[in-house]
Structures are given as C-alpha cells and as structure tokens.
Image (cartoon, grey):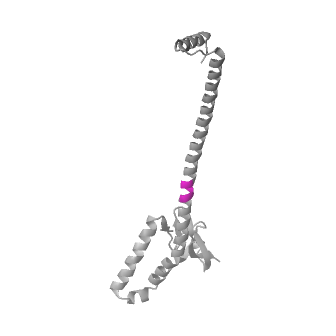
Amino acid sequence: MPQDENDDVVFEETVEGEGEAFSKDKIKKLREDLKEAKAKEGEYLAALQRERADFINYKKDETSRLARVKEIATEQFVEELLPVLDAYDLAFSNKDAWEKVEKNWRMGVEYIHQQLLKVLAENGVTPIPAKEGDALDANLHEAIETVPTEDASQDHAISSIIQQGYKFNDRILRPVRVKVFGAQ
C-alpha cells in the first residue's frame, strides 16, 4: 500500500491531539516493525500450510500403507487355509467313500464347506474356473504332468484337475494344478 506524507501528518496531528508527540522517526520505526511482523506472519502461515499439506499426505500414505498391510495379512491367512480347502476337495472327490458317509453328516460337512467358500469370496478369494477339456492357460494353470494323446485337437488341453487354484482379488494365490494332453 503506497504511503503518502499526508498520512504521517494526519497521524502526527491525531497523536499530538491526544497529548503525545511522535516524531517521524518513531512512526517510520513502527511501520518497519509492522512490516517485519507481517512478513513473519506470512512465513508462519506458509509454514503452517506446508505442515498441513505434509500431514494430509502423511495420512493418505498411512491409509494406503495400512490397506496394503491388511491385504498382505489376509493373503497370508488365506494361503494357510488352502490346505483346508484341499482336504474338502479330496474328501468330495472320493465319490465311493463320500457316498457311504451318513447323509445328514455329509450334508453338514458340505454346508460348512459352502460357508467357508462364501466367506472367502466376500473377502476377495475365488476359485479359478477350470474344467477338463479347457485349453491350458499358463497364467492360470500349472501343468504338472503330460498325458499322451493321439488326438491332435486335444494337444495342450486339460485332461484332469489335480488341485484347485485360487485368486485373491486380481492376484493368483495358487494356479490350478492340472494334467494336460500332449500329442505324440
């Protein structure tokens, strides 16, 4: 704001009118002090705004880090559950023995298995779809054995599923382990 000498005169007259006389040097000194105070205020305000921005960034980073830690912990927990799912699959795959088990008990076990799959699905864990005859997809399937075939159309097709694979959100926890046909 531009100063004008009339301001000093008005200020001096006003002050002198109250019984105190200020010299121009005193007024100049007060204005310099005011400028310094305003400059410090600007510095403090800028520092406060930087600290606020840093804190907001810290909160975002911390939220992101905590979400990643939760995801890693969930993934590790699910990996520990995979053998339990494998045990269910193994029990269900032995059709003769499974059919001999009392019907009510069998239904209870199947219900518990369905509940487990539901809870896992709600948390982002899903089985990787695969069936016999599907083409081998190296991103989803792990071929552990080749079954010879004369039929060239079956080359690199899944002959049987050995172990179910699972995804956690978009990541493969474990690929489907399969036997594949191989042309001779």
Rendered position, 131 above or below 171: below
Is 65 in the magenta?
yes
What quarter of the picture does the C terminus occupy? bottom right
Q: In the figure, residue 103 lies in which quadrant?
A: bottom left
Residue 179 x/y as whole percent:
58, 77
Number of marks drawn: 0
Residue at x-position 53% and y-position 54%: 63
Q: In the figure, residue 35 lies in which quadrant?
A: top right
Q: Is residue 100 left or right of residue 23?
A: left
What quarter of the picture does the N terminus occupy? top right
Q: Residue furthest left?
A: 104
Residue 108 x/y as whole percent:
36, 81
Query: In this rendering, does residue 180 appear at all?
Result: yes
Residue 17 x/y as whole percent:
52, 12
Q: Which residues are magenta?
A: 62-66
Q: Main secondary structure of the magenta part?
A: helix
Relative depth, front residue between 176 and 148: 176
Is 91 in the magenta?
no
Query: In this rendering, does residue 135 appear at all?
Result: no
Residue at x-position 48% and y-position 64%: 124
Residue at x-position 37% and y-position 84%: 106
Residue 40 x/y as whole percent:
62, 32
Relative depth, front residue between 35 and 153: 35
Q: Residue furthest front?
A: 19
Relative depth, front residue between 84 and 20: 20
Relative depth, front residue between 184 and 49: 49
